[in-house]
Image (tube, grey):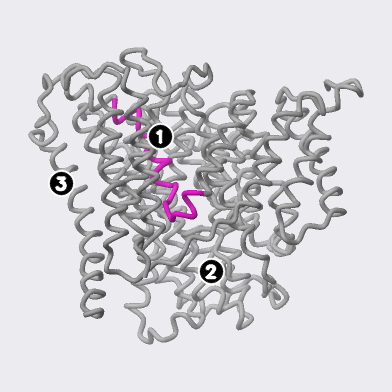
C-alpha cells in the first residue's frame, strides 16, 4: 500500500495548488481595492485562495482515503507530443511553405502518432487534404494564408 | 397566444429565406457527417466548424451552428445503434437497446424510430421554447446584479452536478476556468491581468483555440493510446429503414414521455440532452410491463431517450438565450459564437434583436426537418463513413482545428494557445478532471466578476446583499441544495465502503 492512495486526485490537487499559487503571485501587483470598490486584484485573489484551499483538501483526501486504491496513471506522451509537434511545425512553416505543402507535413507527422501508421496512406491523404484545405479555407473562406511555397511563387 | 404566433411567423419568415434554409441544411449535414465519425464529440465538432461561420450574418451563423449541433447529436445516435459507439454522452443510453436491436437485425427499425422520435421531440421543443422563453426573458430583465451573480453561481453548480467523477475536482475546474476568464483587460479598471506583457493576451485567450486544444487535441491524444479495435458493423443487415405498425404503437407513448421529460429537463440550468436521455430510459424501464426486455432490444429504450435528448438539446437553448447562462459546454460555445458576432447573450437578445431570436427558434424546426430528410435516405453514406479508419480521420481533424484556430483572429498566436491547451487537456484527461466545467467557468468568468462587483458597489460592500434579496437567495439556496443532493449519495457510498472494510 503506497502512501498516495489515489494518485489521480493527489496530482490533480497539486495542479490546482500550483495554479492557485501562480495566480496569487501574478496578481500581487494588481490593486486589491475594497469590497465596495473592487480593484483588479480582488476577484482573482479570491479564486486563487479557493483553488489553493480546494487543492490542499483534494490532495489530503487522496492520502487519507479509506476507499480502494485507484489505478496508477499511465502517461503516454508520445502521441500527444507528436500531434502537438505537427501543429507547431504548421505555425512555424506555413508562411514560407504554403498551405498545401505544410498540410502534407502536418498530416504526415500527425499520422505517425498512430500505432497503425502507413506512410503511403499518410502521404496521399496529406496531399488531398492540403489541396482541399486550400480550396475550402483560402479560396472559399478567404483566410489569409499562402497556398504555395515562397520559392514557387508563394501567395495565391 | 397571438403574440406567440406573430413571433413564430416572423421567425419563420427569417428562417425560410433561401440562404438560411440552405445553411440549416448544410449545418445538419456537416454535423451529422462529423457526428458519425468516431472519436470527436459535439463540442470539438462545433469548435472546429465555427470558423466556417465567421463570414456569415449572425442569424445565419447561429442557424448553421444549431444545425451542426443537432446533426452531431443525431450522428452520435447512429453510431451508437450501428457500431456500439456512442458519439457523445447523450447517446450512451441508446447503445443499450439500439445496438441490441441492430444485432437482432432490427437496425433499420432502431434508426427509424430514433429519427421519428427526434423529429417529433424537436417540433414540440420548438414550441416550448417559443412559449416559455419570453416569460423567462421578461423575468430576467428585472434582475439586478445580485440576482445575476446568484443565477450564474447556480448555472456553474449545475454544470458541476453533471460532470462525472469527483465533485471537488469539478468545482476546482470551474474555479480554474473562472481564472482563465480573468486573463486580459479588466473592464472596470483597464488593468491588463495575467497578460505576461504579451499583446495578444491583453484581449484574453481565444475561446475557439482553447476549446480546440482542450477538447479536440486532447481527445485525439487519449484516443491514440488505445489501439484501434475492429469496429463491428451491423450495417450489412439493414434492409430498409422502416418500422412496423406494431413497433410504432409500442414506442409512441415512450416518444411522448421522452419529449415531455426532455423539454422540462433541458430548461433547467445544468440540464440538457444527457440528463434527459438517462431520465427517460429510467422512466421507460420503470413503466414497462416486462422490464427485462430492456437491454435486450426494447424499442421503447431507443424511442424514449432519443426523443428526450433531442428535446433537451433544443430547450437547453432557453437559459442561454434568455438569461445569458449557458447550461452546458455546447451552449457555452454557442454563447461564445454570439459574442464573436458582438451579441451579448442575455434577455436583451429578444428585445434588441428579435429577428435573431425568433429566426433561430424557427430554424430549429427546419433543422429537424433537415435531419429527417437527410438521415433516412442517406444512411448508406453514413454507414460507409463509419468504415473510415481513425488513422486517416484524426490528422484531418487536427488540420481543420489548426487552420480554424488561426482563422479565429487570423493570428498564429491562437494556434499556440490551442497547442498549450492541448497539453493541459491531456493532463486533465489523465487526472480525470473534466474540461467542460472549466469551459463554462471561462465563458461566465468575466460576467460573474462584473455582476459581483456591481452588486457590491450598490450595497456599499455589504456581502449580505446576495442573501437578503429573495430571488438571489432562492437561487443560491437551490445551488446549495443541488450540491448537497450530489454529495450525499457519495457520502453514503463511502460509508458503505468503510463498512465493508471493517
From this view, report whether residue B447 is shown above or below residue A71. above
Helix, strand or loop under label 3? helix
Residue on which the image places disc 1: B443
> Residue placed at 41% from the left, 32% from the top?
B180
Q: Report the front residue among B171 and B267.
A: B171
Of tags 2 and 1, which is closer to the observer?
1
Helix, strand or loop under label 2? helix
Where residue A141 appears, x then y in whole percent?
A: 71, 28
Q: Earlier in the sequence, mark 3 or mark 1?
A: 1
Considering the image in quadrants, where does the C terminus of chain B appear? bottom left
Between the residue at mark 2 and the residue at mark 1, the CA separation in whole angstroms equals 36 Å
Of tags 3 and 2, which is closer to the observer?
3
Between the residue at mark 3 and the residue at mark 2, the CA separation in whole angstroms equals 40 Å
Residue on which the image places disc 2: B113
**Callout 3: residue from which chain?**
B
Q: Earlier in the sequence, mark 3 or mark 2?
A: 2
Where residue B453 appears, x then y in whole percent?
A: 23, 23
Between the residue at mark 3 and the residue at mark 1, the CA separation in whole angstroms equals 23 Å
Considering the image in quadrants, where does the N terminus of chain B appear? top left
Instruction: Report the side of B14 relative to B290 (left or right).
Output: right
Residue on which the image places disc 3: B477
Q: Are marks 3 and 1 in contact (CB under 8 Å)?
A: no
Where residue A18 appears, x then y in whole percent?
A: 38, 39
Q: Report the front residue among B135 and B328.
A: B328
Q: Earlier in the sequence, mark 2 or mark 1?
A: 2
Span of residues in magenta: B427-449
Instruction: Report the side of B501 relative to B392 (left or right).
Output: left
Q: Report the front residue among A140 and B402.
A: B402
Amino acid at each position: 500500500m503506497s502512501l498516495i492512495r489515489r494518485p489521480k486526485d493527489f496530482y490533480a490537487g497539486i495542479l490546482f495548488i500550483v495554479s492557485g499559487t501562480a495566480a496569487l503571485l501574478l496578481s500581487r501587483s494588481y490593486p486589491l481595492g475594497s469590497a465596495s470598490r473592487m480593484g483588479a486584484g480582488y476577484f482573482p485573489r479570491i479564486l486563487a485562495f479557493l483553488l489553493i484551499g480546494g487543492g490542499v483538501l483534494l490532495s489530503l483526501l487522496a492520502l487519507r482515503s479509506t476507499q480502494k486504491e485507484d489505478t496508477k496513471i499511465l502517461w503516454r506522451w508520445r502521441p500527444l507530443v507528436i500531434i502537438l509537434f505537427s501543429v507547431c511545425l504548421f505555425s512555424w512553416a506555413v508562411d514560407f511553405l504554403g498551405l498545401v505543402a505544410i498540410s502534407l507535413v502536418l498530416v504526415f507527422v500527425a499520422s505517425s502518432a498512430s500505432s497503425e501508421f502507413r506512410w503511403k496512406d499518410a502521404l496521399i491523404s496529406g496531399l488531398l487534404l492540403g489541396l482541399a484545405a486550400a480550396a475550402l479555407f483560402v479560396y472559399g473562406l478567404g483566410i489569409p494564408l499562402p497556398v504555395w511555397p515562397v520559392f514557387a511563387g508563394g501567395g495565391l | 397566444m397571438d403574440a406567440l404566433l406573430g413571433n413564430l411567423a416572423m421567425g419563420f419568415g427569417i428562417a425560410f429565406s433561401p440562404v438560411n434554409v440552405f445553411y440549416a441544411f448544410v449545418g445538419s449535414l456537416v454535423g451529422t457527417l462529423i457526428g458519425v465519425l468516431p472519436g470527436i464529440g459535439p463540442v470539438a465538432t462545433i469548435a472546429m466548424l465555427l470558423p466556417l461561420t465567421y463570414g456569415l450574418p449572425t442569424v445565419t451563423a447561429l442557424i448553421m451552428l444549431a444545425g451542426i449541433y443537432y446533426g452531431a447529436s443525431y450522428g452520435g445516435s447512429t453510431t451508437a445503434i450501428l457500431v456500439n459507439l456512442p458519439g457523445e454522452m447523450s447517446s450512451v443510453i441508446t447503445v443499450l437497446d439500439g445496438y441490441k436491436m441492430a444485432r437482432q437485425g432490427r437496425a433499420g427499425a432502431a434508426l427509424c424510430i430514433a429519427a421519428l422520435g427526434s423529429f417529433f421531440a424537436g417540433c414540440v421543443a420548438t414550441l416550448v421554447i417559443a412559449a416559455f422563453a419570453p416569460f423567462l426573458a421578461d423575468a430576467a430583465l428585472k434582475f439586478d446584479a445580485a440576482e445575476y451573480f446568484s443565477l450564474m453561481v447556480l448555472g456553474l453548480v449545475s454544470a458541476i452536478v453533471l460532470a462525472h467523477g469527483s465533485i471537488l475536482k469539478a468545482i476546482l475546474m470551474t474555479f480554474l476556468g473562472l481564472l482563465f476568464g480573468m486573463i486580459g483587460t479588466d473592464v472596470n479598471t483597464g488593468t491588463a491581468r495575467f497578460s505576461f506583457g504579451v499583446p495578444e493576451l491583453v484581449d484574453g485567450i481565444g475561446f475557439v483555440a482553447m476549446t480546440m486544444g482542450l477538447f479536440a487535441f486532447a481527445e485525439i491524444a487519449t484516443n491514440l493510446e488505445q489501439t484501434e479495435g475492429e469496429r463491428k458493423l451491423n450495417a450489412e443487415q439493414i434492409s430498409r429503414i422502416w418500422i412496423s405498425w406494431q413497433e410504432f404503437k409500442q414506442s409512441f407513448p415512450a416518444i411522448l414521455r421522452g419529449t415531455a421529460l426532455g423539454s422540462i429537463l433541458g430548461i433547467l440550468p445544468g440540464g440538457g440532452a444527457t440528463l434527459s436521455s438517462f431520465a427517460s430510459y429510467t422512466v421507460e424501464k420503470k413503466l414497462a410491463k416486462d422490464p427485462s426486455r430492456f437491454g435486450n432490444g426494447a424499442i421503447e429504450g431507443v424511442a424514449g431517450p432519443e426523443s428526450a435528448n433531442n428535446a433537451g438539446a433544443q430547450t437547453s437553448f432557453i437559459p442561454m438565450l434568455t438569461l445569458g447562462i449557458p447550461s452546458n459546454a455546447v451552449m457555452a460555445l454557442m454563447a461564445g459564437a454570439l459574442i464573436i458576432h458582438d451579441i451579448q447573450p442575455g434577455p436583451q437578445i429578444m428585445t434588441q434583436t428579435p429577428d435573431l431570436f425568433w429566426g433561430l427558434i424557427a430554424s430549429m424546426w427546419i433543422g429537424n426537418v433537415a435531419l429527417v430528410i437527410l438521415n433516412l435516405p442517406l444512411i448508406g453514406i453514413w454507414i460507409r463513413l463509419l468504415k473510415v479508419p481513425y488513422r486517416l480521420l484524426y490528422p484531418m481533424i487536427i488540420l481543420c482545428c489548426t487552420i480554424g484556430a488561426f482563422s479565429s483572429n487570423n493570428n498564429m498566436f491562437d494556434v499556440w494557445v490551442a497547442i498549450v491547451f492541448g497539453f493541459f487537456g491531456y493532463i486533465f484527461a489523465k487526472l480525470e478532471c473534466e474540461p467542460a466545467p472549466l469551459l463554462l467557468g471561462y465563458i461566465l468568468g468575466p460576467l460573474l466578476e462584473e455582476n459581483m462587483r456591481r452588486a457590491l458597489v450598490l450595497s456599499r460592500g455589504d456581502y449580505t446583499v446576495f442573501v437578503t434579496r429573495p430571488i438571489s437567495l432562492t437561487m443560491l439556496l437551490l445551488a446549495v441544495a443541488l450540491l448537497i443532493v450530489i454529495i450525499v449519495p457519495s457520502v453514503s457510498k463511502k460509508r458503505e465502503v468503510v463498512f465493508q472494510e471493517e
